[in-house]
Amino acid sequence: MIGSISESTGLRQPPIRPREDQKIEQIVLPSRNPVLLSDLLEDRDNLGYQVEAELYLPKRCNDPAPGVVVSEGLGGLQDSRERGYGRRLAAEGYVVLVIDSFTSRGVGRNGDLIRSYTVTEAMMLADAFAGLAYLSAHPDVDQGRIGIVGFSYGGMVSVLTSYSQIAELFLPAGPRFATHVSYYGCTIPRLEDPTTTGAPVTMFLGEQDRNVSIPRAQKIAADSSDGLGGRPHRVSTSHVYRGEAPIQSAASICNRSSLPERLRAHG
């Protein structure tokens, strides 16, 4: 279902106080820094990079919990968006990894233009799969129930992680994401080989959004109909959801009953 560059100052303090039913950790995880996907084919061993992230944990994990990697939008981490999902999903029993790709590469305080020229899709993909590898090795996470949620630039990344050739490029031996969710993700890439991993993909697009194309999203879905098997959802909104409301209404991934069974938290 398709439903001048500033320097990084090192590991930041937690930006928000955790709720009583969760805790937040600031972590650094090993990723890669390819400008292009082809860089991984030419010089795979010399692309190591350290990426900052925020780990949102339920206070109690009696059983391995489902995990979620959050890929940020071009506007960077926002309390009402990426961090809002971290808080709410952790409260529902998920282990959530919110990755800060832009600050990690020294452009956290710059505008969208510099960010988009500095941090490429290949770098964002590297961080997403680094997050998947990290959560799959976490003792509180069920390796078979890890999904990815992305916004705007990160929404495009969320869809791209569903393609088999890209997943194999970053993690040849696995694991794979169990589900993919994209909110107003850029509808730019179409792959010549659209074979997917078979995990469900949900795309939420705004009918008034000039930065996305619903017809093109439908073509992307048709390209890989065997793997995605659906069509984009339509959400009447502009490109950026404002405030917390979309997390409660359109986003609905925070509602356990709306998550794919393979990812849903127990309790």
Image (cartoon, grey):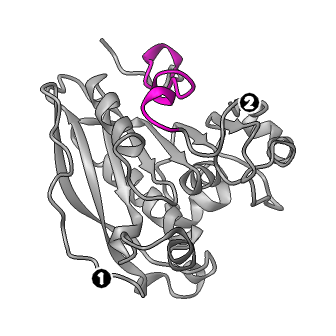
Crowding around mark 1 (Cα neighbors within 10 Å: few <14, some 14 to 19, many 20+) is few
**Residue 46 located within the stretch drawn in magenta:** no
Identify the magenta region.
242-259
Residue at the image point whose x is 25% and y is 40% from the top: 56
Could you tell me which secondary element the residue under label 1 belongs to? loop
Residue 88 lies, in percent from the top left, at 33, 29
Amino acid type for the residue under numbered disc 1: Glu
Residue drawn at point x = 34 percent, y = 69 percent: 103
Describe residue 63's horizontal placement relative to residue 67 as left or right: left
Q: Which residue is mark 2?
A: 234
Front-lying residue, 174 or 258: 258
Question: Position of 79 compared to 159: left or right?
Answer: left
- State how many labels appear: 2
Q: Secondary structure at mark 2?
A: strand
Disc 2 crowd, CA 10 A, few/some/many (<14, 14-19, 20+) = some
- Tell me where residue 264 appears, x and y as whole percent: 43, 22
Q: Between disc 1 and disc 2, whose residue precedes?
A: 1
Q: Residue at x 36, y 21 (%)?
A: 265
Disc 1 from disc 2: Cα separation? 39 Å
Residues at discs 1 and 2 in contact (Cβ within 8 Å): no
Give the vertical position of 28 relative to 242 (above or below).
Answer: below
In the image, residue 245 lies at what x, y percent?
Answer: 47, 26
Left or right of 170 on screen, residue 212? right
Q: Which mark is residue 140?
A: none
246 left or right of 30 in image: right
Q: Quadrant of the C terminus?
A: top left
Q: Is residue 243 magenta?
A: yes
Task: For the N terminus, give its image quadrant.
Answer: top right
Q: Which of the 4 quarters of the picture holds residue 53? A: bottom left
Residue 7's disc number: 1
